[in-house]
Structures are given as structure tokens and as C-alpha cells.
């Protein structure tokens, strides 16, 4: 009897130990890389599909520095990781603008010495000194993208300058009744709430200035109404809905548009 109790208790200890080991490996991977590496290296926490393999290979060849990439899917995943290990072992982190402000407030980002970064002068002025990091104390831009519509030309039969956000935010049934489209349809919409809010503001008022409570409520109601004709909230897989003919239009960012055109 005692042996069975011991074996059951010991089994639970092994399971807990296994989970703790996996946890430590996942969250302290950069430190593990450094410990076992005999060459100079840099540890980068990055979104998938951010850096092309050719660029990484060229960097390693030119500098002799090994690049260890750890991938994340969303900013909140990075935020959770930093709250657990304070970003231990990471030299560079790839995050969205709003997350720069959040992590900097918690003193989780290194403050740059601009004297050591002469290339800052080559950056486009429209991408620097933004409100989330005035003076670029904690971050530097490395990419930017725009939002637009990807659509089936055979369905809409309109020149590009007549394709507007109306076709995403207005009821397709009503557009069909008005004779603007040949049939009702579904859309692929952005899956990030912040992006959706900004695009709704651009559609409604033509800008993304500070919102008052009334404007937030109007955007909320607009997005709730839009849900009736949204097939999927996605940017990663919008191409499959388009190619399969499930939806004739998708609102998405330019980095994913490029994937569609390269397909």
C-alpha cells in the first residue's frame, strides 16, 4: 500500500518537474543559448515573418555574430514573457509601437545611447519621435506598413480609385440593393481590436485623432453592426478565404498583401 502511495506521489513530482523544466527552457532560452555558445551571438525575440532568412544570413556572414531567434505571435505574448523573466537574455525585441510605451513604463527596456547609433540620422523623420516613445529613448523603427483592400476584380468590377472602405463597413445587402455590387457577400476583417478601431475611425471621420467617449461608442456600434457580414476576423489566413471564393474582399495590412501577390 505504501509503495503504491509512494509511486503515485513520485509520479506527480516527475510531472511537475517536467513542466517546470519546460517552463524554464521556454522563458530562459536566450540565457541557455549564451551558456552553450562558444561564439559571439545576439538573442532576438521577434514576430514570425519579420526578418527574411537571407538578411539574417548576410548579417551573420558580415559580422561573425550568430543570431538566435525566438518567435512570438502577438505583443501580449511578449508582454507576458517579459512580466515573468523581465526580458532576461534578450538583446533585441520586436514589438508594436503601443507595447514600447507599456514596457518602457515598467522599466523593461534599455535606454539607448544615441551617440553610439549614428545611423539614427538616416531614419525617416515621420517614423521617429512618435508619441509612444518621444526622443526614441527605447525604440527605433525598422518597418512600417499600410492598410488597404484586397478584392476580387471580377466581383466588384470597379477601378481601384472607386474601391473604398464602404465595401467593408457598409451592409453588403444594402449595397446590392443600391446596385453598387452584383450580390451580397461576406468580408475578412482585421483581427486586432486596435487596428479595427483605427480603421473604423478613418472610415467614419477620416482621421485617428484622440477619441472622446461618444466617438468610441459610435465605433463600437459600427463594429458590432459590421459583425453581421464578417466571415472571419483574420489577416494571417485571409488569402485562403479569397482564393477559395468564400469572400471577395479583405481589409488587411500591406505585409500580408505581399504574401498574396507572391502566392
Image: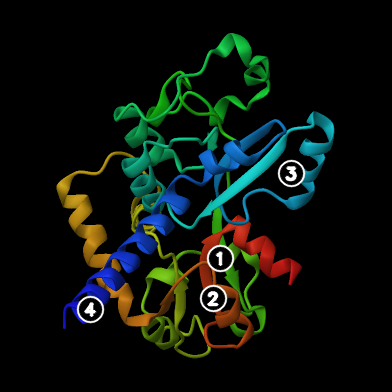
Give the CA distance from mark 3 to mark 1.
Answer: 31 Å
Q: Quadrant of residue 91?
A: top right
Give the CA distance from mark 2 to mark 3.
Answer: 34 Å
In the rendered structure, which disc, 2 or 3, sits on the residue that comes first in sequence?
A: 3
Picture coordinates of residue 190 (x, y %)?
Answer: 44, 65
Q: Is residue 163 left or right of residue 133?
A: right
Give the CA distance from mark 2 to mark 4.
Answer: 65 Å
**Residue 3 has which mark?**
4
Tell me: residue 44, above or below residue 250: above
Q: Quadrant of residue 174?
A: bottom left
Quarter holding the C terminus is bottom right
The structure's colour scheme is: rainbow
Circle 2 sits on which residue? 249
Query: Which numbered disc, 3 or 1, marks the residue closer to the eye?
Result: 3
In the rendered structure, which disc, 2 or 4, sits on the residue that comes first in sequence?
A: 4
Q: Is residue 61 left or right of residue 228?
A: right
Q: Residues within 10 Å of mark 1 (few under 14, many from 20)?
A: some
Circle 1 sits on which residue? 149
Mark 3 residue element: helix
Amino acid at each position: 500500500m505504501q509503495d503504491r502511495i509512494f509511486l503515485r506521489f513520485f509520479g506527480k513530482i516527475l510531472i511537475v518537474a517536467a513542466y517546470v523544466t519546460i517552463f524554464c527552457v521556454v522563458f530562459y532560452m536566450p540565457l541557455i543559448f549564451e551558456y552553450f555558445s562558444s561564439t559571439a551571438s545576439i538573442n532576438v525575440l521577434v514576430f514570425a515573418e519579420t526578418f527574411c532568412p537571407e538578411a539574417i544570413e548576410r548579417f551573420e556572414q558580415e559580422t561573425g555574430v550568430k543570431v538566435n531567434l525566438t518567435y512570438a505571435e502577438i505583443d501580449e505574448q511578449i508582454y507576458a514573457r517579459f512580466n515573468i523573466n523581465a526580458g532576461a537574455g534578450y538583446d533585441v525585441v520586436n514589438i508594436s509601437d503601443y507595447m514600447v510605451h507599456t514596457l518602457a513604463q515598467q522599466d523593461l527596456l534599455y535606454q539607448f545611447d544615441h551617440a553610439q547609433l549614428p545611423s539614427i540620422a538616416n531614419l525617416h523623420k515621420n517614423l521617429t519621435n512618435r508619441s509612444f516613445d518621444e526622443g526614441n529613448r527605447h525604440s527605433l523603427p525598422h518597418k512600417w506598413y499600410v492598410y488597404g483592400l484586397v478584392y476580387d476584380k471580377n466581383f466588384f468590377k470597379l477601378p481601384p480609385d472607386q474601391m473604398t472602405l464602404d465595401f467593408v463597413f457598409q451592409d453588403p445587402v444594402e449595397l446590392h440593393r443600391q446596385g453598387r455590387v452584383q450580390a451580397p457577400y461576406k468580408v475578412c476583417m482585421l483581427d486586432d481590436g486596435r487596428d479595427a478601431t483605427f480603421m473604423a475611425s478613418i472610415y467614419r471621420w477620416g482621421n485617428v485623432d484622440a477619441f472622446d467617449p461618444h466617438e468610441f461608442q459610435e465605433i463600437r456600434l459600427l463594429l458590432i453592426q459590421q459583425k453581421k457580414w464578417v466571415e472571419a476576423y483574420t489577416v494571417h489566413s485571409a488569402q485562403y478565404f479569397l482564393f477559395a471564393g468564400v469572400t471577395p474582399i479583405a481589409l488587411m495590412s500591406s505585409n500580408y498583401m505581399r504574401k498574396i501577390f507572391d502566392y
